[in-house]
Each structure stands twice: as C-alpha cells, then as structure tokens.
Image (spheres, helix red, strand yellow):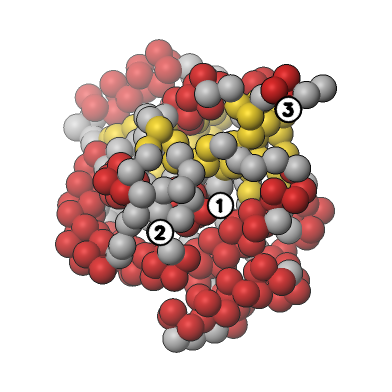
Amino acid sequence: MTAEQQGGTALVFPGMGPTRFADMAEFLATNRHARRRLATADEVLGYSVYERYRSAPDDYAEYAQIAFLVACLALADSAERKLGAVPELVTGPSFGQRAAAAYAQSLSFADTVLLTARLARCEEEFFAEEHREAVTHCVVHTPEDVLKEVLAELAERGEWYDISGRIDRGFHLVSLREPVLDWFKGRISDVGGYNMYTMWPPVHAPAFDGLRRKAEAEVFGEITVSDPKLPVVADQDGSVLTDAAGVRRMLLDTFDRPIHWPDIVATLRERGVRRMCVSGPDNLFTRVDSTREHFELVHLVPPRVRGRG
C-alpha cells in the first residue's frame, strides 16, 4: 500500500488525566528525551520537577502537569522514527493544546513549561476566590436531547451550568456547582446515562471568562507565541491555525470555550488523515467511537502505563 493510499498522519497530544508517579517514574528517569526535557524544565523553574512530582499533593498539581507535558513531548520526539512518517497536522484537546503548540514550535519548550507552571498557579488563585463550588463532570451514554432535559431541570432549580465539552455521541463535560452534583448524577442514572468522573479545577466553561482575562493579563504577556511550523487544529472548533494570533487565541479560548472533539475529527478526515498518533497517557480520546471508527490508531505511552491498560 502506498503512502497516498494510506493517507496522512496527525499527531495528537491528549488532555491530562490522573497519572500515577509510579507509572511515569521509570520513563521520566531513563528515557533520553524525557531526561533532556526534564533538565530544561528544572532550569526554567529552578527546582527538580521529578522530585516534586514524586510528592505532588494531587493529580493536577503544578509539578504533575509539567511531568505530564514532558512525557507527552518526549514520546513524540521519537514518533517520526516509529511511525515512518512526518505528521501533517498536530492537535491537542484541553491540556494537550500546550504540547501541540510546543511541538509545532509556536511556543518554545521553555516558554511552554513556564506557561504551564504559571497557569497552574493562576487557576488555583482564581478558583480560591471565584466559582469556588464549581466542578466539571463527565457523562456518557447520555444523548444530547436527554441531557438537555436534565439540564432544563437543573435550570428550573435556579442552578448554573455550562457545557464544557463534547467528546462523542452522548459523551459530554458539564460544569456545575458541587452541592448539586449528587442530584445531577442521580438524574443522569435515572435517564439511563452513566457518570464517569468529576474534575477540579473545573474547565472550559463560558462562565470562566474572568480566568481568561486574568491569565491573559498575568501570564501571557511574558510568553512569545510564533507562527507554527506545522498546522495546529484548534480543540474548540476544529479550525486549522497557521499563524501566531490563531494559536494564542486557542490557548486563551481554553478557559471559557468548550472543547469539541467531533470537530477535530471532522477536520482531520477532511484533510485526508487516516492514521492518528496519540502521544501520551490517555483513557478518553483513544477510546471513543469517533476515533476508532475513522482512524488507524497508534498510541504512544510509557511502558508502565501501557501495562495498566
């Protein structure tokens, strides 16, 4: 089969999910690409990312985020050799958009590390003062019309909610107040849906426009965004970004615009992509029907993570 018949290749950096230090430690300590990137991150931040990750207080602590970023990019460093092809497009839903911007050389790796660390602190400060009860909850097997009925009931109770992401058919992220989460989960179960997990800090909600403004004012002013060397597919709407302004906008949109994986899938298919290389630990985007139905999937993960399936 020729390369033309095989179609193009896209590189995808996944959103960040809980990943145990024990599963990542050996890869970070022994992989030459990871060691090189960790050394740069340590120099930028002035501390040992590895040592702080070892004792990180939660799955999304600043040090855990940096370690996840390092692992995803280190895996991608050798992807071309393993794939035998150069990716034609790069994308990254949610947290993955930072690694995507770095891989496309729209952000330097040093600036990506600095951006990630400072945004972690920025989010912590913001949610300590505003939207303190907000969480983002993941539901599956819940058709959109059925979800709308449950959300209408929530609105009748005078409660706030935002759609924070559409992942696949019947698969959504919903942001709402934690005090009504148990009621919401109960209603999802009542209508035949399934509750997956709840995230804090919450993400991608239009109500968090204040976080966007805070991040832009306090973090992005010191970060240089350049035109990408490789087209970047925005995770909010699947648009193809080829200039610095577009990438910068995508990075800011993450705070107050929902992600939309089906739009990414549609763009990749329109561009002739047949093979998707996912670089990093993921239990979400590699498992949904829209990914498996349309692409040959290559998933690069640290050995211990692969072993956990």
Q: Nearer the viewer, residue 101 or 304?
A: 101
Residue flagged by tag 2: what amino acid is it? Answer: Leu
Q: Where does residue 254 sit, x and y in percent of width and height?
A: 34, 45
Residue flagged by tag 1: what amino acid is it? Answer: Gly
Q: Is residue 112 visible?
A: yes
Disc 1 to disc 3, how far (Cα)?
33 Å
Residue flagged by tag 3: what amino acid is it? Answer: Ala
Q: Is residue 265 visible?
A: no
| Left or right, residue 77 beside residue 44 | right
Q: Which mark is residue 60?
A: none
| Left or right, residue 262 beside residue 85 | left
Q: Residue furthest top?
A: 145
Q: Where does residue 276 sit, x and y in percent of width and height?
A: 65, 35
Q: Is residue 110 above or below residue 194?
A: below
Q: Residue 28 sits in which quadrant?
A: bottom right
Is disc 2 placed on a helix, strand or loop?
loop
Q: Earlier in the sequence, mark 1 or mark 3?
A: 3
> Residue under circle 2?
107
Q: Is label 3 or label 2 in front? A: 3
Is disc 1 placed on a helix, strand or loop?
loop
Q: Residue at x 77, y 48 (%)?
A: 82
> Residue under circle 1?
17
Q: Earlier in the sequence, mark 3 or mark 2?
A: 3
